[in-house]
Amino acid sequence: MERRAIIFHGTGGSPDICWYPWLAGRLAARGYAVEVPHYPGINVEPIATFLPKVLNGHGFDEDTVLVGHSGGAALLLALLEHVDVTVAQAILVAGYCTRPNTEEEPVLQQGYDWAAIRSHVRDIYFINSRKDPYGCDDRQGRAMFERLGGTQIVRDDGHFGDYNQPYERFELLDQLIP
């Protein structure tokens, strides 16, 4: 089977900002079929109506790698709970499972079936920063790690890319994906 990678941008983002194009190019050069979809509805539309669009818009199999940033990482929790296969790997960058600040978070479900999520991914990473300005910090990563296992990586890198934080390359992600 062909290896596939899907990179989900964060709230208000697009496929052509921060490290997404760089990572897509690195993975494509290694033989991955890479998708970096544009979903303006991430964290705008309620997850109950948004998730079916994502599930129907992509193919998922045992060779799929999922990468999500911020709201895109939170989306991965719902996606992994409801996908009907076990994917190879998921990397949640600046991810969160509860409201990280005072903003509404339509991407979050009311609750999660953590066992289902764990059963649908072979290898899972949580990369969070102690200095995340939006609250998508190491405590959020720890909360997911405690429920799902995997690997938690804590850095001091802000939000790993934002309107005021250029982050054009993300070498760590390139190293984590085989």
Image (cartoon, rainbow, N blue to C red):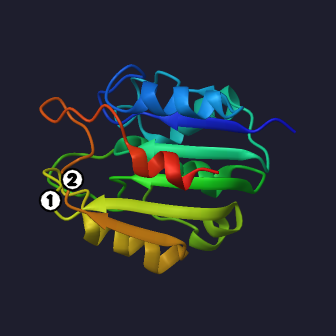
Q: Quadrant of residue 101?
A: bottom left
Q: Quadrant of residue 162?
A: top left
Amino acid type of the residue tagged 1 in the rendering: Lys
Residue nearest the observer in this picture, 110 or 137: 137
| Residue placed furthest toward the bottom | 146
Amino acid type of the residue tagged 2 in the rendering: Asp
Q: Nearer the viewer, mark 2 or mark 1?
A: 2
Circles 2 and 1 in contact, beta carbons < 8 Å? yes
The correct choice, above or below, for 21 with respect to 19 in the image is above
- Mark 2 vs mark 1: which is more N-terminal? 1
Q: Disc 2 marks which residue? A: 157
| Residue placed furthest toward the right | 1
Residue nearest the observer in this picture, 29 or 51: 29
> Which residue is painted at 35% across and 36% down in the image?
169
Q: Around disc 2, counting alpha carbons within 10 Å, would you say few (fewer than 14), some (14 to 19), or many (20 or more)?
A: some
Q: Quadrant of residue 155?
A: bottom left
| Residue 14 placement (x, y as % from top left) | 37, 22
Q: Quadrant of the N terminus?
A: top right
> Which residue is painted at 31% across and 30% down in the image?
18
The local secondary structure at tag 1 comes to loop
Q: For marks 2 and 1, give the CA distance.
A: 7 Å
> Which residue is painted at 70% across and 49% down in the image?
83
Q: Around disc 1, counting alpha carbons within 10 Å, would you say few (fewer than 14), some (14 to 19), or many (20 or more)?
A: some
> Which residue is painted at 16% across and 36% down in the image?
165
| Residue 38 placement (x, y as % from top left) | 47, 21
| Residue 80 placement (x, y as % from top left) | 62, 54
Report if residue 75 is visible in the image: no
Q: Give the label on residue 131, or none.
A: 1
| Residue 60 placement (x, y as % from top left) | 74, 41
Q: Is 88 placed left or right of 68 in the picture? A: right
